[in-house]
Image (cartoon, rainbow, N blue to C red):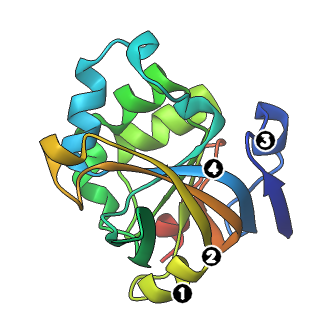
Amino acid sequence: MEYHLGLPVSSEEIKKLHVGDVIFVSGCIFTARDEAHLMMLEKDRSGLSFNPSEMALYHCGPLMKKTNGVWQVVSAGPTTSSRMELFEDKFIEKYGVNIIIGKGGMGERTRKALEKHVCVYTAYTGGAGALAAELVEDVPAVHWLDELGMPEAVWMFRVKKFGPLVVAMDSYGKSLYDRN
């Protein structure tokens, strides 16, 4: 099945998604790699100036440029998600994200968290960073750029029909990676 979802997405909408479905998301997504995950896990949720539960989490370290004071995305391909396996379950629980975008799959800890907290892990094609950049309408904010640097900072992207994203792990404990 193919779904076009507007963010934020309800638990009921997530429960409709199954391994192999294709989704496109519109709304705000945020990037977070290893260091951003760790920093956010150390912070109090109420101290954030954005609400991760209303967005999709994108495992991405984008290449950005600033022109006339406005950030533009040059490339925004997914990074290897398995690096976040050590703490993704805690991140899902703390921040209530229900869509994760990445590449390469996640492990058993994440699978259990997806099921427990009604979340899906979706795969975006690696090597398609320029295509992903074209799907970003604007960059409303960046957080911790000075502390973490460009690839590790948390970037907010407003996207329209971002995808195709393949549901690789669903909220029922199923994984596309088990089949292959």
- Where residue 168 appears, x then y in whole percent? 57, 63
Inter-mark Cα distance, 4 to 2: 12 Å
**Cβ atoms under marks 4 and 1 closer than 8 Å:** no
Which of the marked residues, 4 or 1, is nearer the chain's N terminus? 4
Left or right: where 116 falls relative to 129: right
Q: Amino acid at mark 4?
A: Cys
Is residue 11 positioned above or below 166 on the image? Answer: above
Q: Secondary structure at mark 4?
A: strand
Q: CA distance from mark 2 to mark 3?
A: 26 Å
The residue that label 2 is drawn on is 135
| Amino acid at pointer 2 | Leu
Residue where numbered disc 4 is placed: 28
Q: Nearer the viewer, residue 70 or 171?
A: 70
Q: Secondary structure at mark 3?
A: helix
SS category of the residue bearing label 2: loop
**At 28% across and 52% down in the image, what residue appears?**
33
Q: Are marks 3 and 1 in contact (CB under 8 Å)?
A: no
Whether tag 1 and tag 2 are in contact, CB under 8 A, the answer is yes
Q: Quadrant of the N terminus?
A: bottom right
Asked which quadrant contains residue 150, the reply is bottom left
Task: Name the residue that disc number 1 marks.
Answer: 131
> Considering only order in the chain, which callout, 3 or 2, is on the residue closer to the N terminus?
3
Residue 26 percent location from the top left of the image: 74, 59
The residue under label 3 is 15
Identified at 39% across, 30% down, the residue is 91
Tell me if residue 100 comes above or below residue 43 in the rendering: below
Q: Are marks 4 and 2 in contact (CB under 8 Å)?
A: no
Mark nearest the camera among 3 and 1 is 1
Q: How many marks?
A: 4
